């Protein structure tokens, strides 16, 4: 999808190239993260992909086309671009900000409205509430969501993201990362993502390109980067605790077990006692008619009478299918539990993770 071949950028009077003979291949649907210290060529490389900067040498192909032969305006309309500063138009409403490129492409009005509303809902923004507001009325995290939505408005196959979550607080940043990873599972865009944060790179990338002084030091999957760093520079960049960092690469869905006892909220305790009284474990999970998790029924209450729903106990924590195991471990420890339930975005129960599952995942070697 994106191919860089022997690409260099040499500025006049510079002591060394900003980008030096770089070759990369980013496959369709992959997220390639460019990471490295300041001045290593990350942003320069990204800007050459959409011709904001012209390479001195080499060729760049996007979707099979040599970008030097493509009108730069047309090229950029087919590439979503998200930057740290967001760059929303302050005088325009959120709706109009997101609709910018579709309007330039002269989409029909009804198609634009449908697409903008669809994206706002995808980003967790209510079109009726937020659509008429201006950027100054939103929080930093909400503005960043709008920036991503605007980049996706014309449904470009390629997205460039330059430190997209760097301007928000750490908690909001983590949530935005998780939301984007979940969304990427659905939209499967081809993404080039710039960051200086190796932990963000390990979390967000399917492939990571480590740059130093304009040169490619290593191009590998996150797991390969942790287990087989190319040299001391990469090893220092990744840092210690590689075993624990593996937990940032694995989602709850990948390790959860689906063997757990569930009952409906309207079940009688006598029925549950007869069916599950001798089963192992101390909890029976309670769901509604749509399999949404409501809580748990303690087995110590099996000698009671009546309906299960009268004795439902709330769960301290749950995680979603796309939650990283590092966060699942944190939730387990904060709750003082050894198991945690996994739900989807609609709170439908999908499985359960035991502490031992996380321990096993951290120590597994491919």
Image (cartoon, helix red, strand yellow):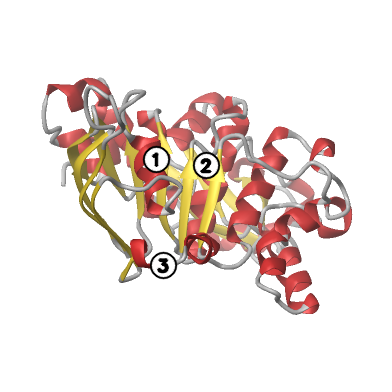
The label on residue 70 is 3
Question: Mark 3 or mark 1, which has the lower sequence index?
Answer: 3
Q: Are marks 2 and 1 in contact (CB under 8 Å)?
A: yes
Q: Considering only order in the chain, which callout, 1 or 2, is on the residue closer to the N terminus?
A: 2
In percent of the image, x 45 and y 64: which residue is there?
188
The relative height of residue 78 versus residue 140 in the rendered view (above or below) is below
Instruction: Kindly report which numbered mark, 3 or 1, lies closer to the viewer in this rendering.
Output: 3
Q: Nearer the viewer, residue 88 or 274?
A: 88
**Residue 328 position in % (x across, y down):** 47, 37
Query: Which quarter of the picture shows residue 365?
Result: top left
- Residue of label 1: 203
Tell me which numbered mark, 2 or 3, is placed earlier along the sequence.
3
- 237 in relation to 255, above or below: above
Say which residue label 2 marks: 177
Which-is-in-front pick, marks 2 and 3? 3
Query: Image point 62% across, 33% down: which residue?
Result: 172
């Amino acid at each position: 999808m994106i191919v860089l071949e022997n690409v260099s950028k040499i500025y006049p009077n510079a002591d060394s190239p900003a980008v030096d003979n770089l070759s990369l291949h980013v496959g369709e649907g992959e997220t390639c993260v460019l990471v490295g210290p300041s001045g290593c060529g990350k942003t320069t490389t990204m800007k050459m992909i959409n011709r904001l900067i012209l390479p001195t040498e080499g060729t760049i192909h996007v979707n099979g086309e040599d970008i030097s032969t493509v009108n730069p305006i047309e090229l950029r309309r087919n590439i979503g671009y998200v930057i740290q500063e967001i760059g929303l138009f302050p005088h325009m409403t959120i709706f109009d900000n997101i609709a910018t490129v579709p309007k330039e492409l002269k989409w029909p009005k009804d198609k634009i409205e449908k697409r903008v509303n669809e994206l706002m809902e995808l980003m967790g923004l209510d079109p009726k509430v937020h659509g008429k507001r201006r950027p100054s009325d939103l929080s930093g995290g909400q503005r960043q969501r709008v920036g991503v939505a605007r980049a996706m408005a014309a449904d470009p196959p390629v997205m460039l993201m330059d430190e997209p979550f760097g301007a928000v607080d750490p908690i909001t940043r983590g949530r935005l990362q998780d939301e984007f990873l979940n969304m990427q599972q659905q939209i499967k865009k081809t993404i080039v993502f710039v960051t200086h944060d190796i932990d963000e790179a390990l979390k967000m990338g399917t492939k990571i390109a480590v740059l130093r002084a304009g040169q490619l030091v290593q191009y590998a999957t996150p797991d390969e980067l942790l287990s087989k760093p190319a040299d001391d520079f990469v090893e220092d960049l990744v840092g210690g605790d590689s075993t624990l960092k593996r937990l940032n690469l694995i989602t709850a869905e990948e390790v959860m077990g689906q063997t757990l006892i569930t009952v409906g909220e309207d079940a009688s305790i006598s029925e549950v006692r007869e069916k599950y009284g001798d089963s192992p474990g101390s909890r029976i999970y309670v769901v509604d008619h749509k399999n949404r998790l409501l809580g748990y029924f303690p087995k110590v209450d099996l000698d009671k009478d009546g309906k299960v729903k009268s004795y439902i106990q709330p769960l301290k924590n749950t995680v979603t299918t796309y939650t990283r195991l590092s966060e699942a471990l944190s939730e387990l420890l904060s709750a003082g539990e050894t198991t945690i339930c996994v739900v989807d975005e609609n709170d439908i129960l999908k499985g359960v993770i035991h502490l031992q599952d996380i321990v096993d995942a951290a120590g597994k070697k491919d």
